[in-house]
Image (spheres, rainbow, N blue to C red):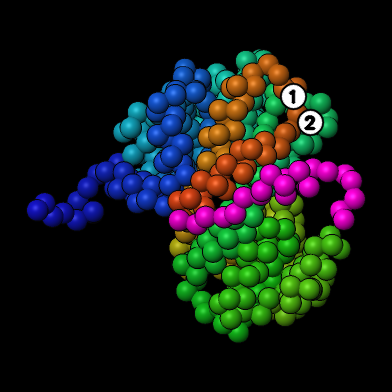
């Protein structure tokens, strides 16, 4: 029996092992990959993808390649790339333009390089690829069949583009699929955010006052997992319906400026900018920890924090200590970027299985619908959403009931229910 230590392997070989490990938890993508290998629904289609370069993304990429796609990748966040996964993909023959820790100039240069592929399909996390295409290479839009977007932030940007009539081709909002947001956003973000903060700080959650900014699906997941760790959770919101839901879910709800006076840990998950701003930092207690789980690093106003500070030092990986002029300390995690990917490994593969299954099937659907869709943001087709749910249940060994013909006709009838 051959015996070896992972440390003795090359970076690409290490990545391949981790990709295989993640693949064990992605049975739905595996089923799609097997079908794609036989049917080749993406044969010869050029795809440019701006995604988090992780082992889960690698499994999606390999499935698309099996379907015949000609794929090029770049990173959707400077701190989310797993270099071993990137090296493994390159070894598998899939070009990757991403380096963990790249600066903004390199980040956008990599996006432009991915666009040199002249894509017929685009895949995005945050809409940076699509927006760059429309700003820098508008001539490419005419040849794009369609694209997919997997984040709340990206869908907001794309819908704004569509309203302004600036969107040049159809995009499917994969983020809004029920088999994505109910599970990826809630369970994935919840677990991985807690994981990232724990890894970077080694704090004990029990008894801490945790302020969750935003009570969308991501905020719900974070609040639930923090509560499960024994934290006292406070939710801040601008939407009265979401605030009411948080209150009825058992959380304390208050304005953020008030929460800043009592909170120990602050986590943003809103998709908006300057959620934590100068006025909030001034009110925070000495030793407050701030982290972001939204897609872009604009939710925490870092320039405002720096303007209030007389010194800054890195005291742990992913932990920057800001000493304010007033003498107190605030700790910023992961440079304000996605803490679950900056300091941890992102969402567990099992939940990304459904998100990436949606991605693959939506790309296949877009090719079938070529020329039939106007430039706009579209929902995931219901049949695809349900099929992903069915495949996931099957992989878990769970069976469910089916409607009888009588029940189906009853639900489709408008006549009296008696």
Quick one: SS at disc 2? helix
- Using the image as rendered, state which of residue 158 and residue 244 is in the foreground: 244
Which residue lies under the disc numbered 2?
A: 162
Q: Residue furthest bottom?
A: 207
- Counting residues from the start of the chain, the first of labels 2 and 1 encountered is 2
Residue 100 vs residue 207, the one in the foreground: 207
Side of 115 relative to 248 (left or right): left
Quadrant in the picture for the C terminus: bottom right
The residue identified by callout 1 is 375
Q: Residue at x 46, y 67 (%)?
A: 199
Toward which corner of the image does residue 227 lie, by quadrant?
Answer: bottom right
**Can you see residue 14?**
yes
At a point 67% along the width and 39% down the height, the residue shown is 382
Q: Can residue 276 be seen?
A: no
- Most foreground residue, 406 or 231: 406
Q: Which residues are magenta?
A: 397-418
Up-down relation of residue 194 to residue 299 (above or below): below
Q: Is residue 329 above or below residue 305?
A: below
> Based on the displayed image, in which of its 4 quarters is residue 367 positioned?
top right
Q: Residue furthest left?
A: 1
Residue 334 picture location, percent across and down = 54, 59
Q: Residue at x 55, y 21 (%)?
A: 119
Q: Is residue 335 above or below residue 26?
A: below
Q: Is residue 275 left or right of residue 77?
A: right
| Spot occupied by residue 96 in the image (x, y as percentages of width and height) | 43, 33
Distance from disc 2 to disc 1, alpha carbons, whole Å, reads: 7 Å
Q: Pointer 2 and pointer 1: residues touching (CB < 8 Å)?
A: yes
User: Most prominent secondary structure in the magenta stretch?
Assistant: loop
């Amino acid at each position: 029996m051959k015996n070896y230590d992972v440390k003795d392997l090359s970076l690409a070989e290490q990545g391949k092992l981790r990709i295989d490990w993640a693949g064990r938890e992605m049975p739905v993508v595996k089923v799609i990959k097997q079908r794609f290998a036989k049917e080749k629904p993406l044969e010869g289609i050029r795809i440019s993808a701006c995604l988090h370069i992780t082992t889960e993304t690698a499994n999606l990429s390999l499935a698309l390649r099996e379907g015949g796609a000609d794929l090029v990748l770049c990173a959707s966040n400077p701190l989310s790339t797993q270099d071993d996964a990137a090296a493994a993909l390159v070894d598998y023959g899939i070009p990757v333009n991403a380096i963990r820790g790249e600066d903004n100039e390199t980040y956008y240069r990599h996006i432009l390089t991915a666009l040199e592929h002249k894509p017929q399909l685009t895949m995005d996390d945050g809409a940076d690829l699509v927006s760059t295409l429309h700003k820098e290479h508008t001539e490419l839009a005419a040849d794009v069949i369609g694209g997919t977007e997997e984040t709340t932030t990206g869908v907001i940007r794309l819908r704004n583009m569509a309203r302004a009539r600036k969107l040049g081709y159809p995009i499917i909002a994969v983020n809004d699929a029920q088999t994505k947001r109910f599970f990826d956003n809630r369970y994935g973000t919840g677990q991985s955010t807690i994981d990232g903060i724990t890894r970077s700080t080694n704090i004990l959650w029990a008894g801490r006052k945790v302020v969750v900014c935003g009570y969308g699906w991501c905020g719900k997941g974070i609040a639930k997992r923090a509560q499960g760790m024994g934290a006292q959770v406070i939710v801040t919101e601008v939407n009265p319906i979401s605030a009411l839901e948080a209150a009825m879910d058992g959380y304390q709800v208050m304005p953020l400026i008030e929460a800043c006076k009592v909170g120990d840990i602050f986590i943003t998950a809103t998709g908006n900018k300057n959620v934590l701003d100068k006025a909030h930092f001034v009110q925070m207690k000495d030793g407050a920890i701030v982290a972001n789980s939204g897609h872009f690093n604009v939710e925490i106003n870092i320039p405002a924090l720096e303007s209030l500070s007389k010194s800054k030092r890195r005291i742990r990986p992913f932990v920057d200590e800001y000493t304010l002029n007033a003498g107190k300390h605030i700790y910023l995690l992961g440079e304000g970027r996605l803490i679950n990917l900056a300091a941890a490994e992102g969402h567990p593969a099992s939940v990304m299985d459904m998100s990436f299954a949606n991605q693959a099937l939506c790309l296949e659907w877009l090719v079938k619908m070529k020329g039939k869709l106007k430039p706009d943001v579209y929902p995931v087709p219901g049949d695809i959403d349900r099929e992903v749910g069915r495949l996931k249940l099957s992989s878990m060994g769970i069976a469910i009931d089916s409607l009888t013909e009588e029940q189906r006709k009853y639900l489709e009838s408008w006549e009296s229910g008696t």
